[in-house]
Structure formats: C-alpha cells, structure tokens
Amino acid sequence: MKTRPRRGEDNSLIKEAGSRRKLTRAEEVRTRLADDIVDGKLSPGMPLDETEIAASYGVSRTPLREAIRDLAAMGLVETRPHRSAIVTRPSPEHLRQMFHVMAELEALCASLAAASMTLSERRNLETIHEGLAQILKENDPSHYHVLNEKFHAAIYAGSHNAYLVEITLATRRRLSPFRRAQFLTTGRLAKSYKEHDAILVAILQGNRELAADTMRSHILTVEDSYEEYAGLKAPSVSL
C-alpha cells in the first residue's frame, strides 16, 4: 500500500516521524550491552566489570548502572548485592514462549485498534509507515528499529485499552534486543515493511479479524527471523 500526503499536507510530518532522537548515554550503553549479550559476545554467567565497561565505553558509572538496571528488568542481567552483575538470557524455549505471548498481545491490540482508532491516530500510523519506507531506501536497520517501535506503539495506543498497553509494552521491552537483531538478516527490512503494510490496510479498513491475523503472523515471522539470525533454525528458502 502506498500512501500519499493529503491535500494541503507536505512531507514534514513524515520527516518528523522518521527523525532520529539522540539516545541518552544510559540508552547507548544499554543498547550496546544488550546487543553483545544477544550476539553471544557476552556469555551467560559472565560478570560485568563496571570499571572495565565504563572505561571501554567512555562513560561514567552513573549511566552504566542505569543501563544495568534496565537490562536486569529485561532479563538479560542478574544483579547481586555487593557483587558484579552477571549476564543471563532466556533459554531458546522460554524465548519462543515469550514471542508467542507477544504475538497474541499484539494481535489483540491490532484488532481493537481496527475498531477504535480515531482519524488522527490512523493518519499518524500512515505517516509513520511512510517514514519507514524512506528508511527502507536507506537500508538502515538501527533507524528502522526505532521507527518500527513507533509503528507498533501507535497501534497499542490505538487499542484504547490502558491495561493491554501496559502489559504489551512490558513484554515488548523484554524482547526488544531480540526483535532488533532480526533486522540484520538478509532482506528482513523489506519483508517487515510489507508485513506492516498488510497490518495497516486491515486497520484502516476496520477489519478486526484481518488486523489480528496479519499482526499475529508478523510477530511469529519476527520470531523466525531472530531464530535464523541466531542460528537456531535454517534460513527460509523460497520455492
């Protein structure tokens, strides 16, 4: 689906939706550490030496400790009183279970959004989708991940169910590093955009069942893409 700016509307909204927000130092450290854990550069059980990491990343201990607290909440680090935090990560089976719960939560969000989104919320979702199209041309996985989160968050908000948004965001936060890693697989950005397009069409049509089905399929494909990236399954082959 190709959307166009409406009459009297320029591309400024699209540019704004796709603009890069500068990360805080704590967010930068959290992202780098999370990526190293997901990539296996930091193995489960490995202690995190704050002095060494702070020097390596060129940051003080304050943002580093904030990053470690965030990683602990995400289940990637275990903090211990008066001792260094250690690396941990969910088992492949637990990760699959998390993705399946995520798929059902997001499917429900999409279904409710198809029925409840206001006109301005629908337009905002279209604008974010256009921003993703521009990033796709740049082939920038990191920036795509940032705006991808905005796309999904807009759908959560469009459900108009505060408790559902709360638990969906909490689950997404736990899976965020793994969802980010999937964009490093070959061709994943283009496939993700196409999947988003189908979700957007269903929501704009007000088709609750189709919105739920396309979102569920999208999240399960995200799981498959991450497993392919992590070497947990063979790459899919088009026949």
Image: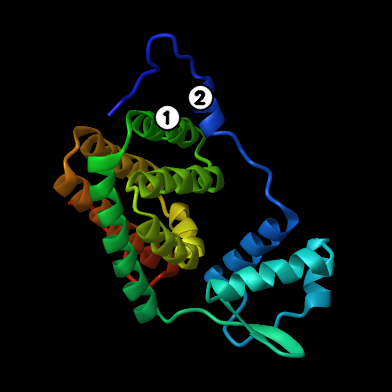
Residue type at tag 2: Leu
Q: Is 64 drawn above or below residue 216 in the view shown?
A: below
The coloring applied to the image is rainbow
Q: Quadrant of the N terminus?
A: top left
Residue carrying label 1: 127
Nearest the viewer among 144 and 159 is 159
Q: Is 84 drawn above or below residue 222 in the view shown?
A: below
Q: Is 161 drawn above or below residue 89 in the view shown?
A: above
Q: Residue at x 34, y 53 (%)?
A: 161
- In the image, taking residue 146 as reference, residue 222 lies left or right, namely left
Q: Secondary structure at mark 2?
A: helix
Q: Residue at x 70, y 62 (%)?
A: 29
Residue 47 x/y as whole percent: 69, 85
Residue type at tag 1: Thr
Q: Are marks 2 and 1 in contact (CB under 8 Å)?
A: yes
Q: Quadrant of residue 205?
A: top left
- In the image, taking residue 49 as reference, residue 43 lies left or right, namely left
Residue carrying label 2: 13
Q: Residue at x 58, y 64 (%)?
A: 35
Nearest the viewer among 190 and 95 is 95
Residue 236 x/y as whole percent: 27, 59
Residue 184 x/y as whole percent: 47, 54
- In the image, taking residue 143 as reference, residue 93 lies left or right, namely left
Pointer 2: residues within 10 angstroms few (<14), some, or many (20+)?
some
Q: CA distance from mark 2 to mark 1?
A: 7 Å
Q: Is 157 drawn above or below residue 41 in the view shown?
A: above
Could you tell which of marks 2 and 1 lies nearer the N-terminus? Answer: 2
Q: Residue at x 37, y 15 (%)?
A: 6
Q: Secondary structure at mark 1?
A: helix
